[in-house]
Amino acid sequence: MFHAGYTSWALMARQALIVLAVVVAFGVLVPLYKGFGFLDPRIIAAYACLALLFVAPASADLAALYAEKASPAAVLARMGLIVAYGWGITVLILVTGLVTMNLGNHRGGFAAPPWRFLTALLAFSLMASFAIAALCAVLARRFSASGIKAILRTGFLVLLLLLVFGARFLPESWQLEVLDHLSSRRELTRLAWEGSGLAAVASAILLIPILKRPGE
């Protein structure tokens, strides 16, 4: 029992150090380096999506809960904690970044993206986190935690490759239009709200099998 307790505390301490390192890197060093360039809509959008990087691997551990025949209520409670953890750290990093940028480049007043823009991005981040957590809970019925993490890594890698290289296969006029959309706060706000709706629908569909006990 002592060994298990020590291992648990060691894991928590390591996780805390990782979170601290991420907050310092993205919440302090990057804003200091970028200055007011930190307010670029694409950078703020990328920061809002950091929640998925925290939620995805933690949600994969739901496989252990299903292996123990956990009840739907227990799985939902674990999902809620994981999403709150990942999304909360993301908000902390974003707020820290804005404060750091203002302290390092003080020119009177507090510079920040429009609240409407931030609200849309954080809403998408929250809904997408729920969708990822629900997807992991469903996959846990067929795969182990390591298997789910491998699936998620592959999915994120494919998505990244599409974002980086996909536009090269489009006509030049389309490339310019896509770049224009991704550089506009108005367009990113619209896309974020639409993405939030799609993620909410996906979460609702994925919750159907989760609410059933394993084996039903």
Image: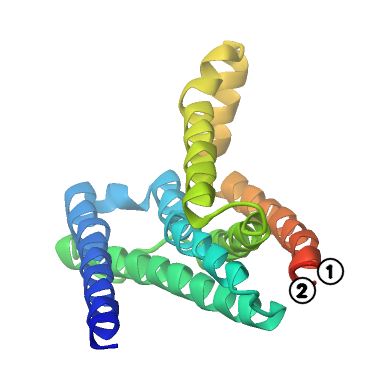
Between marks 1 and 2, how big is the CA–CA gap? Answer: 6 Å
Q: Position of residue 4 (x, y in %)?
A: 29, 81
Provide the secondary structure element on which disc 2 rests: loop
Kind of residue sitting beneath label 1: Glu
Whole-percent x, y for residue 202 in the image: 74, 56
Q: Which residue is mark 1?
A: 216
Whether tag 1 and tag 2 are in contact, CB under 8 A, the answer is: yes
Furthest residue to the bottom? Answer: 2
Q: Quadrant of the N terminus?
A: bottom left
Can residue 78 be spotted in the picture?
A: yes
Task: Look at the image and tell me whether residue 183 can be seen.
Answer: no
Q: Residue at x 62, y 53 (%)?
A: 192
Q: Which mark is residue 213?
A: 2
**In the rendering, at what x and y percent does residue 57 appear?**
45, 57
Front residue (pair 83, 113): 83
Assess disc 2: are there few (<14), some (14-19) or many (≥20) residues with their C-alpha within 10 Å of its C-alpha. few
The type of residue carrying mark 2 is Arg
Residue name at image x 25 percent, y 76 percent:
7
